[in-house]
């Protein structure tokens, strides 16, 4: 399988560290890459802890870099330390695995789909719908739910093949096996 079969892209509303927080952000060795939507409210405190542990930062205030370095050091174990609203995808090129997570309250959305050996994700449905391989078949139960409740409950979306990662959950996607594991 081609080793260059991962693409991470980001359109960013820059609020914190506008100059230094460009995304996708990569680790200095190129092994890890992150795309991230949201804000880590305790990023300053986490940055100080990381600096005390010997980490050196390339940016002045980027919460994206704080999150990247935490994930490199602690993996999904760092999620318990995060105070904020976020959805992110963290790619490990050596393990060929993608770790994705959503904040506890589910403020930031995370949609994903898997079909034809492809996995795609986005913070908005309309972004996924720009991909030619994404099935646009309407989920009839979700349509009923939307028309009667004015929202789609649970992990479903209005489309059959697109799901939402629930609030306070993370998923791991293996590029080798195509397996998705979801953990609360």
Image (tube, rainbow, N blue to C red):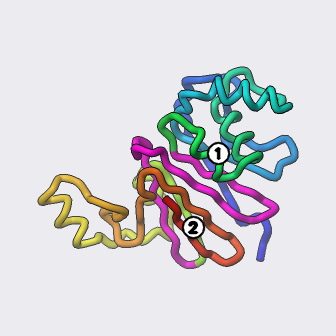
At 67% from the left edge and 78% from the top edge, which residue is drawn? 177
Provide residue 112's location: percent of width, then percent of height.
48, 61
Q: Nearer the viewer, residue 139 or 166?
A: 166
Q: Residues within 10 Å of mark 2 (few under 14, many from 20)?
A: some
- The picture quadrant where one finds residue 67 is top right
Secondary structure beneath dot 1 equals helix
Residue at figure coordinates x 60%, y 77% from the top left:
117
| Camera-nearest residue between 160 and 63 | 63
Where 82 sits versus 9, above or below?
above
What residue is shown at x 61% (from left), y 51% (from top)? 89
Q: Residue at x 47, y 37 (%)?
A: 85
The residue to which callout 1 is attached is 78
The residues colored magenta run 87-116
- Residue furthest left as drawn: 148
Residue 74 or residue 178, whichever sits in front: 74
Q: Position of residue 59 (x, y in %)?
A: 75, 25
Closer mark to the observer between disc 1 and disc 2: 1
User: SS class of the residue under badge 2?
Assistant: strand
Is 58 magenta? The answer is no
Sequence-first tag of 1 and 2 = 1
**97 on left or right of 94:** left
User: Residue 56, percent across and down?
Assistant: 84, 29
In the rendered image, which residue does mark 2 sit on? Answer: 119
- Image x and y of residue 79, in percent: 59, 46
Residue 105 on the magenta span: yes
Q: Please determine whether, in this image, residue 156 is positioned above or below residue 48.
A: below
Q: How many marks?
A: 2
**What is the C-alpha distance between the residues marked 1 and 2?**
24 Å
Q: Is residue 67 above or below residue 91?
A: above
């Amino acid at each position: 399988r081609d080793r260059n079969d991962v693409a991470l892209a980001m359109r960013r509303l820059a609020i914190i560290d506008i100059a230094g927080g460009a995304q996708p952000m990569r680790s200095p060795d190129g092994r890890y890459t992150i795309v991230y939507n949201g804000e880590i409210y305790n990023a300053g405190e986490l940055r100080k802890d990381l600096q005390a542990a010997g980490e050196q930062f390339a940016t002045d205030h980027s919460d994206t870099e704080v999150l990247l370095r935490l994930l490199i050091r602690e993996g999904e174990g760092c999620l318990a330390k995060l105070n904020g609203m976020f959805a992110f995808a963290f790619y490990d090129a050596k393990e060929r695995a993608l770790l994705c997570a959503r904040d506890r309250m589910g403020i930031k959305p995370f949609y994903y789909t898997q079909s034809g050996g492809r996995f795609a994700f986005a913070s908005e449905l309309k972004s996924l719908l720009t991909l030619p391989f994404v099935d646009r078949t309407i989920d009839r139960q979700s349509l009923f739910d939307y028309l009667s409740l004015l929202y789609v409950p649970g992990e479903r979306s209005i489309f059959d093949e697109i799901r939402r990662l629930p609030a306070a959950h993370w998923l791991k996607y293996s590029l080798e096996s195509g397996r998705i594991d979801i953990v609360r």
